Structure formats: C-alpha cells, structure tokens
C-alpha cells in the first residue's frame, strides 16, 4: 500500500493548514523559556514537509528532525527535503523517540494518520518520561468512528465471537484491540460513535500523560515535578474526523514562565474538554480579499459578501489570520 | 582473657516482639494497592453471603468512592457483628477457632487492617447489624506512638450498642479512610488507576457480579464479561464435577471442597486464552498460560502457543471452609503445592488434552486445500454459552478431522512479493485472503501455460 501522502496532498488540506498556523502562533510565544530559534522541532514531515517549512520560515528553528517510518523510499524523502537543516531518521517513531537527546527543549508534533493505539500511547509515554521543562508535545490522531462493516465482516465477527453482530459491541471490540487496558473503565459501544470517539481518545491521551508524569514525579521533590498544561484541543475534518491535543510540559517551579508565555491571549487555546473546531469554508480569492478588508472587527459587526452564507462568513472571521490561500501557479 | 558466664534472669531474653511500625511495614509491603482495595470488597461480599446464603444478591450493593483525600466504601450487606469485630475483624491474624462465613473470601484475617494501613493514617469503621451497631475510629499515628506493650496493640470501639432490633435493609458497613499516604493520593488522582481497579474488580468478582450484587466505583457500575464457551451439537465443552472430603484433605471431618472444571473453545484471543481459577467465587488466576496450570513439559503438555488462542479452561473451587482452598493470602496466586490443587491440576491436564488436539487439527485442516472442513465448520457455527448454564457433566466433543485426502500428494508453496502488488492482485482476483491469491495465480498459470486445468 502506498503511504497516505500519495493519496492526499497534505499541502491542500485547508483545516490542517489552519491548525498548523495556529500551532505556529502558539509556539512563537515560548520565548520566556528560551529564544524560539533555539528550540528543536521533531515531527513527521512526510514528503511535503509543510510543518517544517512553516516553522523554519516563521520561527527560524534550525534544529529539525523528521521521523519517517516508510523506509522503502528514502531517496524520495531526501529529495523533497526543503531545507538543509532538516535531518531525517528512517524508522518508526517508537524506535526513534527513545534515542533522542531529551535534554534539549523540544517541540514535538506526533502527527499520525492512524487511530489512537498502544504504540501511540507508548510514544506519548516516552516523551512524558523524558522531555525537559518548556517542551511542547502535540498529538494528532484519526478519530473517525468505524462505519457499519460489510455483510462479510459482520458474518466474520459473528463466527469469531460466537455472538450476534452489534455495531456498538463491534466498535468496543476494535477499541479494546487498539487501546487495551487504557480504555477508560465503563466505556461502552455508544461512547465510540460520532464525535464521542474523539472525546474518548482525548481522555485516553490525557490519562496516559497523567499516568506517566505521576511515575516520573514519584521520586522528585515538589518544585522539580513536571506538570502538563493542555493548550491545544482541535477537531477538524478535511476527510476523516481528526483530533489534535497537546500542551506544554514544565517544572512546577517554572509556573511563572508559563504564565509569561501568555498563551491564553490566543483565541484557539483550549485547556480542557472543550474543543476548538476548525472549519475552513469554501471561499474564492475575491471573497477572501473582500472579507479581509472588513477584518478585524467586533463580533457584533455584520460582515457582507454577496451570496456567501452567514455561517461561512462567521467561520472565516474566526480563522482568517490563519487561513491558507491556494492558487494555481505556473513555474517557468 | 575473655570470661564467659552462664546468662541468667532477663539477660537470656531477646525481645523479639515486633514494633508496630515494623509490623505495618511488613504487613503492607507486599500488597498492591488495587488488591488491598479488593480485600475490602471481599469483606462486603462475605457479608452478602452471610445474609443471602442462597447466592441471590439482588438489591444488595457495594459503593466505593475515592479522591485525592478520601477513600470510602459502603455496603448494605448485613454489617459486621460486634463480637466478630471485637474478636476477629480487628484482631491481627485470624484465630483458628474463628467462626467464618461459610464459603467466605476473607480467609486470613489480615485483609481489613492491612488495607487501612496501606491506604492512610486515619480510618473510621461504622457498622450496623440487625442486633448491634459500633464505630471504630483509629488515628494510626497516635496508635503507633502509644507504646508497644501488648494491651497497646488493641483498637477501641468509640461507640457500641447491642440488643437492638434493626431491619435488615438498614444494616451495612461504612468504612472511611483519610490522611491518605502520598503514593495513594497520587494513584487516586489518576483515571488510569481507577480503570485498572475497575478492571481487576470486574475480573476478581465476576461470579458475584453475576449474582446481581451491584458494585460501583464513583457511581460507575462495575461490569464484567461472563465466562463463556462455544457450544453446539458438534462442539461441546468438557465439564466435570469433583468433591473432596475434608477427611481426605485434613484428616478431620468438616465441609468438603467442591470443584467444577470446564474446558473448551471460545473467542480466539492470544491474550485471553488459558486457564481461569476461582476460589469461593474469587478469581485467583486469569488466562494462565504457564506451568502453574497445565502448560509445558513439566506436565507432558505443549507450551501455550497462538494456535491455542481459542482455548479456555475454568476451574471453580468452593468450600464452606475457605482454609481448604488452594489460594495465597493476597489472592493473586494459587498455592501450587497444596495436595488438592495437585489432584485437581491432573484433572485439568486431562481435560485440556482433547481440546488442544482439536485445535492442532484445526490448524492442520486450515493449512490444507480441503473443500470439506468439519473442524472449521464446527467452530464457526457454534454459539457462545455461559458456563454456568452447563449442568450435565460430559467429555469434550468435537468432530474428527478428515483423513488426509486420498488424492495426489500435495505441496505447499511460499513466496514474498511487494505488498502493493499483492494487494492489487487480490483486488483483480476478487478474493479475500492472500492464500487465495496464491492459489488463483497458480491455477491461472497452469491453465494457460500447460493447457491443463489444475
């Protein structure tokens, strides 16, 4: 199977592009910990390296590492590397992460295509046990619930379990296979449908971080303990439903430094179960320019563009600073 | 030159009595937190057993709540009688003459106190039975500082009333522990800890939950998966019942030990496959795949293997005298040296063999190209049934494998190709398995290159 990078052009996913810019705007505020240029960025660049391009251009980060699990097309990834400062490691993240020097302040974006699973929780554990104070960890996973399976698969389920098919049970069955004992007690099949799956996934990630930090902190004096503060909780849908959660890891003694970053002045910061939904309305370049000329403004002021639904205008006004513009360019 | 002299008087005595601090340390060091809490649930379940010997626990409940500062467990399961509290429940170690609950789980007389010490430094127990009520309120730090002489080891009732007439529905016990130890506070703050506790509880008390005892953790009902085996006309689980008299076990008369053993197949799961063992309804072993039960050379058996992921065995030991059962004090393991366990294990081994033979033949059948697959058919058409509904003892029943087909000698071929190409071939051939891809390709080649239809 070819990687998803050949099926979807990552650069053209508008909600993802907005998320990327929002994250970048938040990372920029890390200066109280140290100059942002001195941070290390670790991510999954794929062949588009969209996140790497943005963070190098906007923030000047030069210590960059892209982890690539697809070891069969090394030349392709090397060729597409946009800047010389991006190092590549060809191995699954579960193998690479434990080998990194975690003494460096790091921005880590684990941007998976997969649904949450034990390996991902393992990666999160690795980071929580090692990352130094002032580091950022961001996790993106697919949170699309299982659709009703085909007749064949339903029969197979019935044969394997000896029980009549039930969509809720089936989803629970799959969730248990993916997540095992970290699935919260009392989770039922009904909790795994629609938007609720993202809710459960966020909880599992959060619980995983809590648990690992508790292990790490058990032997540390109070002021040396590492705390986690959630900053990001996005849901968006360029195709499948996606969930992004993340935040900052910091020493208890550095609470004031976190305060100085003043993340809360950014409108998309979410510190709890409330999420920020990213929607990218379909607008033409001309409509975008027209709206931009009326922005920013107070929420009470009504914006106007002929023929565009109010809901779309509203959505645009919330994300306009981060909105990507796609256009066709002829390279000569 | 050194002088020796015969010691006399007090000088010969070495003070070997333990200090309270040492005692608490020794008592609590080996018990995991989740297990310590399960011990309290065991006590509630024993209460339920006492007032409902028929085993129907409808409308009885056990409610647990915990946060970073408190632990609380409450039940309406009959309460602890004052004399039991005075003579046994709060005493260290359980005197042999103690009159236990028939078929009880709390066998070792350490459970409650051990749990209190494991959790925190202040506990209050309030209990109401039909005839009495009492409160015990202990500040563990004060108790430790109070001195080491034997009478200073006692706990005192802070309230006590007897000769009452209270309706059974108003009876029960409430236990609260606070001034929690730091590692307990840390654990209680974690949702993953609660999930693990709920999971262990659902396994440990699977049978009790079946009998409608409503156990909740912070309001969340504890549920469990029933013990099931596949059953049909073609495939029947093995089931035997054994009884061992107290005379043969201890040389004294007393209540017997009843053992029920079930072995068969269930949903394929590498993780869940193996033997399960219960003592008086409490799960002691779960999905055991080691020599502790039946697996490996020591028992002239094969070691557990993915082919056996369908296997399930359930062993239930029950006795009114829990001391006769093969469990350890933490209830996390079986006493593998006890004569009764050795005897029963032999039965377990004998019951396991035919199931493994069936599963081995199933894998052989799957490896052949046979059109008729009686073993596969038996396993896919069977339905899961709860083992408790199986009442007639009989041996494991399964279809016989088809003898090697009388046709030509067969040869297996194996090769490796890029996944993307194989996936494409699978789609073009409209088949579901990679085995079928290989077969179809071979047939295709034979048809066009040799002119023969394979």
Image (cartoon, coloured by chain):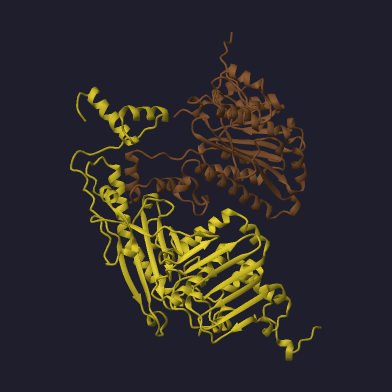
Chain letter, yellow: B
The percent position of residue B427, horizontal first and vertical second, equals: 34, 29
Is B301 positioned to the left or the right of B183 in the image? left
Quarter of the image where one finds residue B415: top left
Where's residue A234, x and y in %?
Answer: 59, 37
Q: Position of residue A51 (x, y in %)?
A: 62, 28
A269 lies above or below A325: below
Nearer to me, A315 or B100 = A315
Q: Nearer the viewer, residue B311 or A290?
A: A290
User: Does B105 appear above or below A279?
Assistant: below
Q: Is residue B8 visible?
A: no
The quadrant the N terminus of chain A occupies is top left
Which residue occupies the extreme bottom position in the image? B9
Give the residue drawn at x 39%, y 85%.
B253
Q: Colour of chain A?
A: brown
In the image, is A331 to the left or to the right of A150?
right
Q: The C terminus of chain A lies in which quarter of the figure?
A: top right
Q: Quadrant of residue B301?
A: bottom left
Query: Vertical placement of B26 versus B153: above or below?
Result: above
Is residue B254 toward the left or the right of residue A183 in the image? left
């Amino acid at each position: 199977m070819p990687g998803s990078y050949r099926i979807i052009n990552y650069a053209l996913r508008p909600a993802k592009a907005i998320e990327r810019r929002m994250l970048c705007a938040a990372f920029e505020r890390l200066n109280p910990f140290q100059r942002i240029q001195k941070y290390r960025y670790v991510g999954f660049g794929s062949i588009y390296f969209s996140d790497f391009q943005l963070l190098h251009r906007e923030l000047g980060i030069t210590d960059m590492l892209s982890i690539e699990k697809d070891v069969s097309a090394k030349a392709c990834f090397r060729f597409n590397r946009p800047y010389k400062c991006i190092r590549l490691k060809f191995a699954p993240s579960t193998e690479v992460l434990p080998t990194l020097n975690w003494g460096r302040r790091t921005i880590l974006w684990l941007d998976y295509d997969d649904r949450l699973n034990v390996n991902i929780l393992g990666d999160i554990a690795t980071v929580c046990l090692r990352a130094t104070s002032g580091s950022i960890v961001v996790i993106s996973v697919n949170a699309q619930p299982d659709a009703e399976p085909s007749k064949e698969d339903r029969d197979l389920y019935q044969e394997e379990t000896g029980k009549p098919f039930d969509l809720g049970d089936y989803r629970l069955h799959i969730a248990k296979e993916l997540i095992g004992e970290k699935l919260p007690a009392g989770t039922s099949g009904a909790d795994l449908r629609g938007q609720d799956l993202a809710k459960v996934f966020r909880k599992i990630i959060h619980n995983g971080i809590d648990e690992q930090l508790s292990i790490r902190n058990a032997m540390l004096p109070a002021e040396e303990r590492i705390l986690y503060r959630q900053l990001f909780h996005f849901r968006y849908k360029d195709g499948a439903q996606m969930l992004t959660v993340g935040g900052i890891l910091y020493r208890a003694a550095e609470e004031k430094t976190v305060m100085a970053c003043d993340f809360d002045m950014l409108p998309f910061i979410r510190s709890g179960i409330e999420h920020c939904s990213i929607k990218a309305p379909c607008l033409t370049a001309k409509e975008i320019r027209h709206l931009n000329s009326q922005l920013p403004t107070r929420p009470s002021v009504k914006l106007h563009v002929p023929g565009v639904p109010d809901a779309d205008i509203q959505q645009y006004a919330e994300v306009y600073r981060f909105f990507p513009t796609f256009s066709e360019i002829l390279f000569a | 030159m050194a002088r020796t002299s015969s010691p006399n008087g007090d000088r010969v005595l070495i003070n070997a009595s333990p200090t309270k601090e040492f005692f608490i340390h020794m008592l609590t060091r080996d018990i995991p937190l989740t297990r310590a809490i399960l011990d309290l649930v065991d006590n509630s379940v024993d209460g339920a057993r006492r007032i409902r010997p028929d085993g129907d626990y409808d409308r009885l409940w056990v409610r647990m709540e915990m946060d970073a500062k408190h632990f609380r467990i409450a039940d309406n399961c009959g309460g602890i009688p004052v004399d039991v509290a005075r003579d046994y429940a709060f005493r260290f170690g359980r005197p042999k003459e103690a009159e236990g609950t028939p078929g009880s789980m709390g066998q070792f007389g350490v459970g409650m106190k051990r749990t209190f010490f494991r959790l925190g430094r202040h506990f209050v127990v309030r209990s109401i039975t039909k005839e009495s009520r009492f409160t015990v309120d202990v500040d563990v730090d004060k108790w430790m500082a109070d001195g080491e002489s034997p009478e200073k080891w006692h706990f005192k009732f802070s309230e006590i009333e007897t000769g009452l007439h209270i309706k059974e529905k108003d009876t029960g016990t409430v236990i609260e522990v606070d001034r929690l130890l730091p590692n307990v506070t840390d654990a209680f703050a974690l949702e993953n800890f609660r999930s693990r506790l709920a999971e262990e509880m659902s396994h440990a008390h699977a049978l009790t939950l079946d009998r409608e005892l409503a156990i909740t953790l912070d309001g969340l009902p504890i549920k469990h998966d029933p013990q099931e085996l596949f059953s049909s006309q073609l495939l029947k689980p093995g089931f035997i019942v054994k009884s061992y008299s107290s005379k043969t076990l201890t040389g004294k008369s007393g209540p017997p030990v009843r053992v029920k053993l079930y072995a068969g197949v269930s949903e394929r799961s590498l993780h869940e496959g193996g033997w399960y063992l219960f003592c008086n309804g409490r799960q002691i072993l779960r999905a055991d795949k080691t020599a502790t039960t039946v697996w490996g050379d020591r028992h002239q058996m094969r070691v557990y293997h993915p082919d056996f992921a369908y296997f399930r065995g359930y062993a239930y030991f029950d006795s009114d005298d829990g001391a006769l059962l093969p469990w350890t004090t933490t209830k996390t393991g079986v006493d593998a040296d006890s004569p009764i366990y050795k005897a029963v294990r032999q039965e377990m081994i004998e019951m396991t063999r035919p199931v493994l033979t069936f599963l081995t033949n199933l894998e052989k059948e799957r490896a052949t190209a046979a059109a008729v697959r009686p073993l596969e058919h038996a396993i896919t058409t069977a339905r899961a049934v709860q083992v408790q509904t199986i009442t007639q003892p009989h041996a494991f029943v399964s279809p016989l494998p088809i003898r090697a087909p009388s046709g030509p000698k067969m040869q297996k071929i194996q090769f490796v190709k890029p996944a993307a190409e194989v996936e494409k071939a699978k789609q073009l051939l409209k088949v579901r398995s990679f085995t079928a891809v290989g077969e179809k390709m071979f047939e295709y080649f034979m048809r066009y290159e040799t002119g023969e239809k394979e």
